Amino acid sequence: MLGLLALLLLAAALLELSAGGPPADADVPAWVDDRFAQVAWLYEILVIASVVGAVALFSLWQVLPTRRPAVAFSVVIGAVAVPVGVVTSALHGRLVYPIGPLDVADDALAAEFALAAYYAAIHVIDLIAAVAAIVLAVGLWRVPGLRAFALASGLVGLVLIAHSYLYLFPSWVAFAMALAVIALVAWLAVLVGRGAFEEAPADA
């Protein structure tokens, strides 16, 4: 599941890069029209990624050394991001998929609000994930053979804090930060597949 999650996050990052970030002016409907396919596909991928993320976190709870308080706390905090991710995808989807007569794309003010709310939700998700990554780093720091991963997790936590303000950066910078997060998820998938956490001691 973690490998699939990494692929979905990569696809989402590529779509964000292709879309070019938020519009520089206030004409959100025109911006959406020019990038309809990217926005629509990003919505679909965010929904799927939210579900896959929930399953992946459940699996991690069973695999990681959750007897360590910091590790357990990091998984629980990560789980908080899942419902926020669902809300985020719903907000993003309103830009391309109307609900009956409620067509956000034809209302400039409503479209601006939906897009602003989407980036605000991304900000929240990134900060939650940052806390989870940093706390996981603390929990795994003394586990034999996992110090490099723990260090990377802590650094990615700092990257996530920066990424929470992705609308302030050029799209390629935001994409590079997303790649760091995706690489950590992929690394975690490899470690889980190798059973690297099976012999982790319970003491902090």
Image: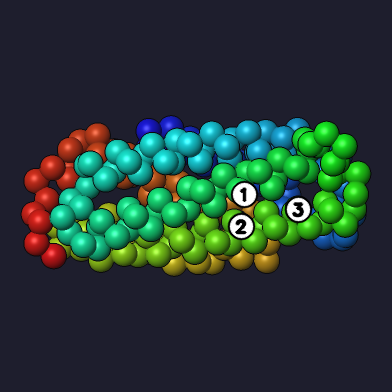
Say whether disc 1 or disc 3 marks the residue closer to the N-terminus: 1
Instruction: For mark 3, give the secondary structure.
Output: helix
- The residue under label 2 is 121
Sequence order check: which comes first, mark 1 or mark 2?
A: 1
Mark 1 Cα within 10 Å, few/some/many (few <14, many 20+)?
many
Instruction: Give the residue pinned by disc 1.
Output: 88
Where is residue 37 drawn, in percent x and y?
75, 33
Residue indicated by mark 3: 114
Q: CA separation, marks 1 and 3?
A: 10 Å
Residue shown at the point (17%, 59%) measured from the top left: 68
Mark 3 closeness class: few <14, some 14–19, many ≥20 residues within 10 Å: many
Please say if the residues under marks 1 and 2 sit with CB atoms less than 8 Å apart: yes
Instruction: Give the number of callouts.
Output: 3
Which residue reaches farthest front?
100
In front of the other: 150 or 116: 116
Relative depth, front residue between 167 and 123: 123
Task: Please provide percent x and percent y for residue 150.
Answer: 27, 59
